[in-house]
Amino acid sequence: MHPPSHHPADGPAIRLAGLRKRFAAGGAPALDDVSLELRTGEVFGIVGRSGAGKSTLIRTVNLLERPDAGSVTVMGRDLLALDEAGLRAARRGIGMVFQHFNLHHRRTVAENIGFPLEVAGMPAAARRARVAELLPLVGLEAKRDAFPAQLSGGQKQRVGIARALASAPSLLLCDEATSALDPETTAEILALIRSLRDRLDLTVLLITHEMGVVKAICDRVAVMEAGRIIEQGRVFEVFTRPAQPTTRRFVAEVIGHGVPPGTLARLPPAPPGQQRRLAQVLFLGPHSTRPVISEASRDFGLDINIVSGRVDEIAGEPFGVMALAVCGAAAAIDAAFGWMRGLGLVIEEDVAWAG
Ligand SMILES: Nc1ncnc2c1ncn2[C@@H]1O[C@H](COP(=O)(O)OP(=O)(O)OP(=O)(O)O)[C@@H](O)[C@H]1O
């Protein structure tokens, strides 16, 4: 049941190179030259809108989907070079969790969890022993004989996770694993996945359309659009310095500060010869404490209203985000923004304020 062990020194846990996939001849590609590497032990998120190609991509990692071109290397093995038996063995090292749980309704929790072991031909006694180890890992000891219909959504997904872990994989693929759950249950399941990663030394690849999921558990993230990866990096970097418009929109869902339209309408017009400009300011790390706004106001002769603001944390690193209405001479505002950027703050004026 134990796949050959893979050490970090052996290279990336997953290496996808030049993947292409087109479902309909002449149609848009679902994967258009996608390359990606996952480090052993990380939680890596792929975020994108519906149709971006996320499901197709995650399904290439265990070859549920075969790419038209490119290579898939998992734990050092070139999956496309394996025969059926080799691929079955490699798949035991890759667990998968699904959005809609995919449980057998006529089987108990224990039988669902043991199902992949049954398929693999493990004797009943060994299976029972393995299931007994898995139940406490996901907090379901009390539900071992329950049927799926008797479980909450979160409990069903715990069964799905235990089943994915049955063959002791080193890699866990999560296909929108929390998209069918309410926010509180989502948070519980994400915390469970992260803690399993720590306890079992897993590498986790997840796909999601929710940037909140990425913020909650991922170490690194890639953003997909039209079959391509348009941006990737450490979660904190991507959240605080998104380079692509699509990424900015995703980030705004989580850390945007959507200024109520009434607030903008109530701001008085700028006096003659002056401007009133709105800016979003990101304070990273040490600047979360420096009184930058009062300094800017004093030293550049500006009126500054804080229209909205909050302090948050991503991957354990603090940052603050504020919407400022700045009033003064155009040159003074430019100079103040230049000074603030020089301090490392990220200032943007082209923001969808009502968003
Ligand atoms: N089996 C299939 N047959 C035909 N077209 C497909 C198939 N699977 C995916 N596609 C198409 O490939 C493109 C990418 O789909 P994919 O499901 O990978 O995107 P996604 O980002 O996961 O979106 P969603 O969250 O809606 O599943 C879409 O245009 C989709 O219609």
Image (tube, rainbow, N blue to C red):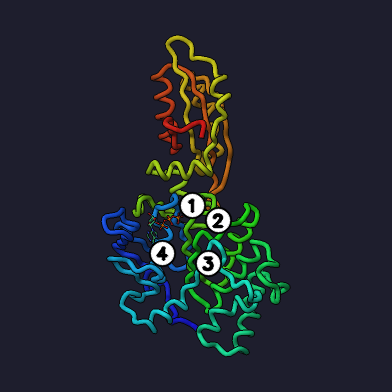
From the top left corner, tell me how far across and down residue 179 is, in percent: 55, 56
Residue 227 placement, left or right of 348: left
| Disc 1 from disc 2: Cα separation | 8 Å
Which residue corresponds to mark 2?
179
Query: Which amino acid type is shown beneath numbered disc 2?
Result: Ser
Q: What is the residue that sits farthest to the top in this orientation?
A: 272
Cα separation between marks 4 and 2: 23 Å
Residue ID for mark 3: 97
Q: Mark 3 falls on what kind of element?
A: strand
User: Mark 1 sits on what residue?
Assistant: 209
Which badge, 3 or 4, comes first in the chain's sequence? Answer: 4
Task: Name which residue lies at 44% across and 80% down.
Answer: 5
**240 to 122, vertically: above or below:** above
| Residue corresponding to mark 4 | 38
What amino acid is found at the position of numbered circle 3 in the picture?
A: Val
Nearer the N terminus, badge 3 or badge 2? 3
Amino acid at dot 1: His
- Mark 4 or 1: the one toward you: 1
Between 93 and 235, which is closer to the camera in this rendering? Answer: 93
Residue at horizontal 67 percent and vertical 69 percent from the top: 139
